[in-house]
Amino acid sequence: MPLMTHNPPDRREFLRAGLAAAGLGLAGLAKGAPRRPNFVIIFLDDAGWSDFRPFGKPDYPTPNVARLASGGCSFTNFYVPQAVCSASRSALLSGCYPGRTRVFGAHGPRARGLEPAFATMGQTLKAAGYRTAVFGKWHIGDQPDTRPPARGFDESCGLMYSNDMWEFHPEHPRNYRQYPLQFWDQGRIKIERVTREHQPMLTTWYTEHAVDFIRRSKAGPFLLYLPHSMPHVPLFCSQRFKGKSGTGLYGDVIMEIDWSVGEILKTLKSSGLEDNTLVIFTSDNGPWTSYGNHAGKTIYREAKGTGFDGGTRSPCIMRYPGRIPAGSFSRRTFSTVDLLPTLAHLAGAPLPKNPIDGKNVWDLISARPGAVNPHDYYPFSTGANFEGVISADGRWKLHLPHAYRVVAAPGRDGMAGKYRQERIELSLFDMEADPFETVNVIRRFPEIAARMQAYAEQHRREFYN
């Protein structure tokens, strides 16, 4: 049964209300009104800003991601509210900030995760007549009522949490030995104990399920959520990609992900769905740089697990032929929390009854002239610590005083490196002049600083009291 915070209406009435919001009606839809779009969200794990073209210039080819970009828009100011697995995924699927859902950090085996009081994107679109599927890493709940089948997804397979939470963890094997890493399929355990023989097949298995789902969903509309386990450590790729990049295992893994993107695009085209599908490609956060040569690269300050842009700014590509300008770049700022209300708008689906924080930013995405971000600011946090705010136009970023981690010595070949702790004072950065967060200009712009501090205090009062 749907796990909303209200009694759901009859599905036909729910669909009618959603279509009315989009200016359609059931009769109009039946008589050939424009079909509602399909949605494909490809969500990587710990990918670096510079791992793919056109954002970076890696020494290995990523032709399929480049092709996706040439047919859509590359967004350079796309943010996640927290640069850690569960918090980031929860924000994407619920449209809510971590401070609202209390989903912080990375949850372990059997964790509650995102409470059913918060509807997911799957529930929102399924109630409006969409077929829904998730193939990959879930990581927002590992109990019967918080796993995918109970959270609005008709089809699902994959891992319930990160692929390093297993008996071979390089630092904490005892913590996970009591919980064998399992591969789930349609709400049941298919592989009781995932081993080193299974991990190289994860990207292939997720892709095969995704391709099959698309082929069976030609009548549409559908939501396909494809959250890859890679390139989170431990790194694995299938035999056909081993050594292919010539740059090491990380490059091989990225090339296999690029292959997966190509398979999705090819299937959409062969199924006649290319022109009616919005494809979104991004990552849950920045690279886990303490793993050295097994981590991606970012041009921004710090990385995963921090509130600096190396952790929270993710490369993002969106393609929707005829609706998003092809081959374009955009510096307009928005966040993963905005995707649920934006997709609901495009689908003509009513929003969840529970409060959400994201807003419809389709005008920004589609480059509508004069479009303005409906937010005042976006918050960022690490774990349960609220660390600051970014202005909605992306220019100003305020860090409240907080500690953060810096890689002191990177690891190698799958072994973790070492961190040291540092601390930042109250700081204001001009992200247009200084996107690398190096020069504190708080004394030069006192009025801007006061406005940003007011936003931060407003957010703290609402979400952290």
Image (cartoon, rainbow, N blue to C red):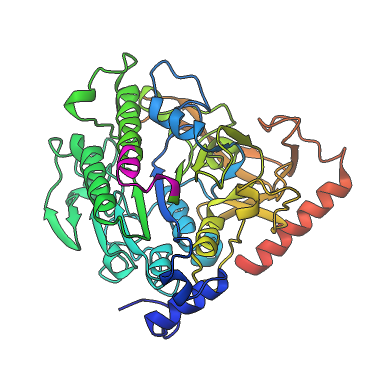
- Name which residue lies at 24% across and 30% down: 237
Query: Which quadrant of the view contains residue 284?
Result: top left
Report the quarter where the N terminus lies. bottom left
* Residue 13 appearing in the image: yes
Report the front residue among 160 and 25. 25
Q: Is residue 345 above or below residue 435?
A: below
Instruction: Point out residue 283 in the picture as x, y percentages from the top left corner.
Output: 45, 41
- Name which residue lies at 27% across and 66% down: 149
Q: Which residues are magenta?
A: 266-275
Instruction: Point out residue 389 in the picture as x, y percentages from the top left corner.
Output: 68, 51
* Residue 277 appearing in the image: no
Instruction: Point out residue 65 in the picture as x, y percentages from the top left corner.
Output: 42, 31
Q: Is residue 442 above or below residue 105?
A: above
Report the front residue among 172 and 283. 283
- Name which residue lies at 35% across and 53% down: 224
Report the quarter where the C terminus lies. bottom right
- Name which residue lies at 12% across and 51% down: 191
Report the front residue among 81 and 439. 81
| Dominant SS type (magenta) | helix
